[in-house]
Amino acid sequence: MHLSQMQQWLAQRRDQGLYRQEQLLQPLPGGLLGFNGQTLLNFSGNDYLGLASAPTLRQAFADAAHNVGSAATGSPLVTGFQRAHAELSRVLCDWLGVEAVLLFSSGFAANQAMLSALVAPDELLLLDKYCHASMQDVLMQGQLRFKRYPHQDFQALRQLLAKAQDKAVVVATEGVFSMDGDITDSRALLSLLSPEQPLLLDDAHGIGVLGEEGRGSWQQQGVTAQQLQCLMANFGKALAGQGGFLAGSRDVIDYIRQQSRHYIYSTALSPALCQAMVHSIELCRREQWRRDKMAENIALFRSGAVTAGLQLTDSVTAIQPLLCRDNATAILWSQALKKAGIWLTAIRPPTVPQARLRICLSAAHSPAQITNLISALVKARPVDSDSN
C-alpha cells in the first residue's frame, strides 16, 4: 500500500470517530489511575478482584524475578519449560479439575491455537456472532468452514445443528462476553449437542470471578470440565497477570501441543510471572471476600443507575455496558467523564456493533466511588444519548 493511501485511510478513521491511540497511564491502588498528573477513578480496567494492587502478589512477583529470573530464554519445547511453568500447570489442573494445560503468551494466542487445532478442515464450526476477535480472526484465514449464529440465540443454533445433519460440528463461544457482560448458559448449550459435538469455551472474563473458588462461568452452572473439550482462560483479567492457557484432557492438550504454532514457536512465559500466578490463584481460591465485594459493587451500581434513569443491559457481571447512539456520543460522554475525574473509555466499532461506555467494576472500588460514578454519568450524559 502506498503511503498516501495509508494517510487517507487514517484521516477517514479520524473523521469517523474510530481512530485509536495509546494513553500513557499509571495504575494506582484503590480503583484509581494516574493520567497527565491527575488521579482519576478507573472504571475501564479488568482488575475484577482488585488483585493487581495486592501487596503480597507484587512481592511474590519481585521475589520470583530475583529467585528464578524474568526470562524463559526460549520456546516451551526448547528451553522455555521450567520448574515454575510445571508448578503453575499443576496448580491450574488442581484448581479446575482437568488433566492437563498448555501455557501461552496471551489469551489471544491460546484462542487461536484452540480453534486451529480442534476444528478439522472437514468439520463445521458454529460460533456465537459476538465472540472475541481472537476467535473471529481464525475464520478470516480461510482454512475453516464456519457459520456464526446470532448472539446467545440458542434457537438459531438448534436450527444450524439440525441443518448440519450428518456433518461433524464443533461449537465455540464465550463464558462471559467481554463487551456485553452477559453469561452463556453452558449447561443449556450442552443439552443441544450430541456427545460427538464438542464445545470449546473462552472463559477469560469468567475465571476467578464466577463459580466455586472462582473456577469460572461453566462451573457456576453445574458443568464439569470434562463436558468441555477445551477451556481457554487467561491471567490478564481477574488474576492480575499476563498470558493465557488451554485446559482439557491429556490427549486433547497433547494434540494441541503437537500442532500449535503459537505454542511451538513463541517464547515461553516468564518464570517469574508463572510463580506470581501460582500465588494469585491461591489468593483467588482462598479470598472469597473479593468475589463477595465485587458482587456487592455490581448490585450497588445497578440499583443506583436504574434509580438515576440510566438504561442498563441485562448484564449481572462486572461488565456493565451503557449503549450510545453513535461513536460521537460515546466519545463526548467519555471526554466529559474524564473532566469529572473518571476514566471510562468509549468502545466503538469494529470492536462492538454499537458504540458504548464499557463500565468495569472491581472489588477494589468503594461504595463512594460507585456513587460518584453514577452521579458523573448522569451529569456528563450527552443530550442525545440512548441511555436517557
Image (cartoon, rainbow, N blue to C red):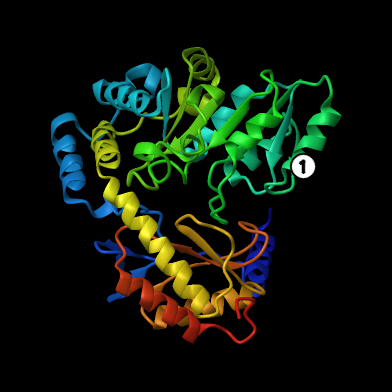
Q: Is residue 356 above or below residue 77?
A: below
- Asked whether residue 34 appears in the rendered view, the answer is no
The mark tally for this picture is 1
- SS label for mark 1: helix
Residue drawn 40% across the image and 59% down it: 45
- 144 vs 85, left or right, is right
Q: Is residue 306 above or below residue 196?
A: below
Which x, y percent locates residue 78?
A: 37, 17
Quadrant housing the C terminus: bottom right
Q: Is residue 377 above or below residue 318?
A: below
Residue drawn 73% across the image and 22% down it: 121
Q: Choose between 61 and 75: the one closer to the eye.
A: 61
Residue drawn 39% across the image and 17% down it: 77
- 161 vs 99, left or right, is right
Q: Is residue 33 above or below residue 141?
A: below
Question: Which image quarter: residue 349?
Answer: bottom right
Which x, y percent locates residue 342?
A: 39, 75
Q: Residues within 10 Å of mark 1 (few under 14, many from 20)?
A: few
Query: What amino acid is found at the position of numbered circle 1 in the picture?
Result: Gln
Question: Which image quarter: residue 360?
Answer: bottom left
Question: Which image quarter: residue 278?
Answer: top left
- Asked whether residue 190 appears in the rendered view, the answer is yes
The residue under label 1 is 155
Which x, y percent locates residue 191?
A: 66, 30
- 195 vs 90, left or right, is right
